Image (cartoon, helix red, strand yellow):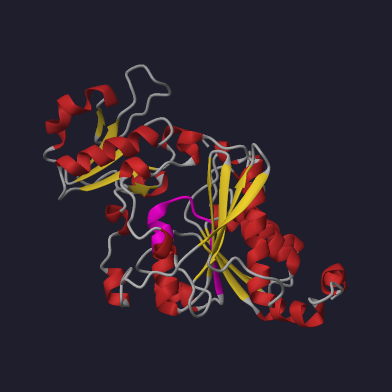
């Protein structure tokens, strides 16, 4: 207990608060810009069991804000590397690692095993899935998000008369309403601030110390260094699925108008199948890539060459960074709604790392 002495001597926190943290379990979904700082301080605070789920790999563009990773981690799974790093410093914590994405297939079992969920994701489909699964399991979850210079933090589904994420955002956004830091940019320190605020909310909920952000949203602006709160209201209308069967039959990606993504490792496993690999980079972009089933259709020519993909059973699209391929996949999904279409996450940059 000496490690936590400066914490438990706080008036009102005490040994009892520390014991509650030790007995608690937290699942962090997404070990990225928000998840890394949250993980660091939840481990340092003495949470007894921490699970980390993330199917993404570390890329060079992550390193300005995802502080658990270094250059030696490039190309490796984020959840595995984050836990490996923290196990060295906090060996007394019970760690669970899930090198996969949260899906409708695994959400029920995973979330059932933890007291509280932390939403460290950067995409709306997973955020709605976390909310709906937590509502069905009656589990609280701590939410955080960033957009350019502003961050948000709140605690949802915390006991009776508590707002859920759907109370604040009842309708899933369309594809043109979903920015992320890869498109809009972010100063690396902002997710650090918001991730730490998320860890603080987790500690307050689990220990009973302080006043969590229940039915309140905290906003922080990094340019002005000002913060403010907004009161949130519980809605009485039916929001989200009523049962696990309904949740498992919900296509969150499609509902949000986003496209499905696949890693290069998964994509390479489909080389010998009836799959069209579509390179939407403009002619002359480097490095070149040659593989079975490759079709070069520059983004600027996509509308004119849609019919070239008519016979493909599956379509995997890539570009330099994964942004243009998402837009191309969205357009192809509109043209061919019955085809299996994926954007390859991170594009050529992820393959190089």
* Residue 32 visible, this angle: no
Q: Position of residue 16 (x, y in %)?
A: 77, 83
Span colored in magenta? 116-128
Judging depth in this view, the residue of 174 and 324 nearest the camera is: 174
Q: Residue at x 65, y 75 (%)?
A: 206
Q: Is residue 31 left or right of residue 325?
A: right
Q: Position of residue 212 (x, y in %)?
A: 63, 69
x and y percentages locating residue 152 in the rendered image: 56, 52
In the visual, does 9 lie left or right of 68?
right
Task: Find residue 278 and report its image quarter.
Answer: top left
Residue nearest the observer in this picture, 318 or 178 = 178
Task: Determine the image quadrant of residue 125.
Answer: bottom left
Estimate the x, y position of residue 65 in percent, counting from the top left.
63, 43
Q: Is residue 60 above or below residue 51?
A: above
Horizontal placement of 144 versus 248: left or right? right
Compared to 273, does 212 lie above or below? below
Q: Is residue 9 magenta?
A: no
């Amino acid at each position: 207990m000496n490690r936590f002495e400066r914490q438990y001597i706080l008036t009102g926190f005490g040994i009892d608060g520390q014991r509650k943290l030790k007995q608690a379990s937290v699942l962090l979904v997404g070990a990225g810009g928000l998840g890394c700082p949250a993980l660091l301080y939840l481990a340092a605070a003495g949470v007894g069991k921490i699970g980390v789920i993330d199917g993404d790999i570390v890329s060079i563009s992550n390193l300005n804000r995802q502080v658990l990773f270094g250059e030696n981690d490039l190309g490796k799974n984020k959840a595995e590397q984050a836990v490996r790093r923290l196990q060295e410093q906090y060996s007394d914590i019970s760690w669970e690692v899930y090198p996969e994405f949260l899906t409708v297939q695994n959400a029920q079992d995973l979330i059932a095993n933890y007291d509280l969920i932390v939403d460290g994701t950067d995409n709306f489909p997973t955020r709605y899935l976390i909310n709906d699964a937590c509502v069905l399991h009656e589990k609280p979850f701590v939410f955080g998000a960033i957009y350019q210079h502003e961050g948000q933090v709140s605690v949802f589904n915390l006991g009776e008369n508590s707002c859920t994420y759907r109370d604040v955002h009842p309708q899933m956004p369309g594809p043109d309403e979903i920015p992320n830091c890869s498109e809009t940019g972010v100063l690396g320190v902002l997710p650090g601030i918001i991730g730490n605020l998320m860890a603080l909310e987790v500690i307050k909920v689990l220990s009973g110390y302080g006043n969590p952000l229940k039915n309140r949203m905290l906003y922080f602006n990094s340019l002005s260094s000002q913060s403010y709160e907004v009161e949130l209201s519980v809605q009485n209308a039916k929001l989200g699925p009523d049962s696990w069967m309904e949740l498992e039959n919900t296509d969150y990606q499609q509902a949000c108008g986003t496209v499905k993504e696949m890693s290069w490792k998964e994509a390479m496993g489909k080389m010998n199948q009836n799959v069209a690999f579509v390179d939407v980079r403009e002619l002359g972009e480097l490095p070149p890539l040659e593989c079975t089933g490759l079709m070069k259709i520059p983004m600027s020519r996509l509308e004119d060459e849609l019919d070239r993909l008519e016979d493909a059973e599956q379509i995997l699209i890539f570009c330099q960074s994964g942004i243009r391929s998402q837009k191309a996949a969205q357009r192809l999904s509109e043209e061919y709604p019955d085809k299996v279409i994926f954007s390859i996450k991170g594009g050529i940059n992820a393959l190089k790392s």
